[in-house]
Image (cartoon, rainbow, N blue to C red):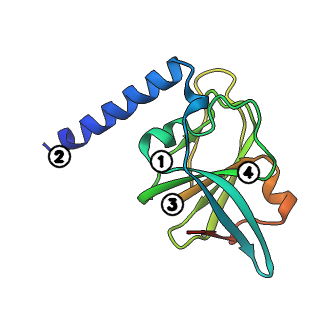
């Protein structure tokens, strides 16, 4: 019975993603916009982000984008800690992903390469996370942020 409670929302999400992707409309999906501040000691950086805060938006992510700005990110927001994996199917830009705990601390950063053929590699955090931030590859080194840096979501 408990499984059935979750089955319908999962099927609806999968169906929505399939329709959006198959129709070529993924570039027309509107993500909420926001700002985050990444800090490490005295250093801080304000970053514009799109927010993937629903199962449908998280499923689409940065798929089908031919390019993204250097100082741009997509923040994946989960209602509770999770261990879900990320993949790069239909994603054309090399990315980095920062896994962030519920208190806003980055605890893992991984480079992700576009998936050229299936099966696509799945990238997992080494522990539960509440947020994940995808940025263009090289972002963290370029700005001097890394593991133990903090991320604050501006309201």
Numbered disc 4: secondary structure:
strand
Residue at image coords 51%, 60% = 129
**C-alpha separation, residue under disc 4 versus residue under disc 2:** 39 Å
- The residue that label 1 is drawn on is 84
Q: Are marks 3 and 4 in contact (CB under 8 Å)?
A: no
Q: Position of residue 31 (x, y in %)?
A: 55, 44
Q: Which mark is residue 72?
A: 4
Q: Position of residue 138 (x, y in %)?
A: 82, 50
Residue at image coords 73%, 43% = 95
In this rendering, would 15 be left or right of 26? Answer: left
**C-alpha separation, residue under disc 3 versus residue under disc 2:** 24 Å
**C-alpha separation, residue under disc 3 versus residue under disc 4:** 21 Å
In this rendering, would 130 be left or right of 98? Answer: left
In this rendering, would 76 be left or right of 97? Answer: left
- Numbered disc in front, either 4 or 1: 4
In this rendering, would 19 be left or right of 6? Answer: right
**C-alpha separation, residue under disc 3 versus residue under disc 1:** 9 Å
**C-alpha separation, residue under disc 2 versus residue under disc 1:** 20 Å
């Amino acid at each position: 019975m408990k499984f059935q409670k979750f089955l319908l929302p999962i099927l609806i999400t999968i169906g929505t993603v399939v329709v959006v992707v198959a129709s070529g409309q993924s570039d027309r999906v509107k993500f909420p916009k926001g700002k985050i501040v990444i800090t490490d000691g005295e250093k801080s950086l304000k970053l514009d982000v799109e927010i993937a805060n629903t199962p449908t938006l998280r499923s689409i992510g940065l798929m089908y984008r031919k390019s993204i700005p250097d100082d741009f990110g997509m923040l994946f927001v989960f209602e509770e800690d999770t261990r879900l994996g990320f993949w790069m199917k239909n994603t054309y830009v090399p990315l980095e992903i920062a896994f962030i705990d519920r208190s806003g601390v980055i605890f893992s950063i991984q480079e992700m390469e576009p998936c050229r053929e299936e099966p696509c590699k799945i990238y997992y955090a080494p522990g539960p996370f509440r947020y994940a931030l995808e940025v263009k590859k090289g972002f963290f080194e370029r700005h001097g942020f890394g593991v133990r840096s903090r991320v604050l979501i501006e309201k």
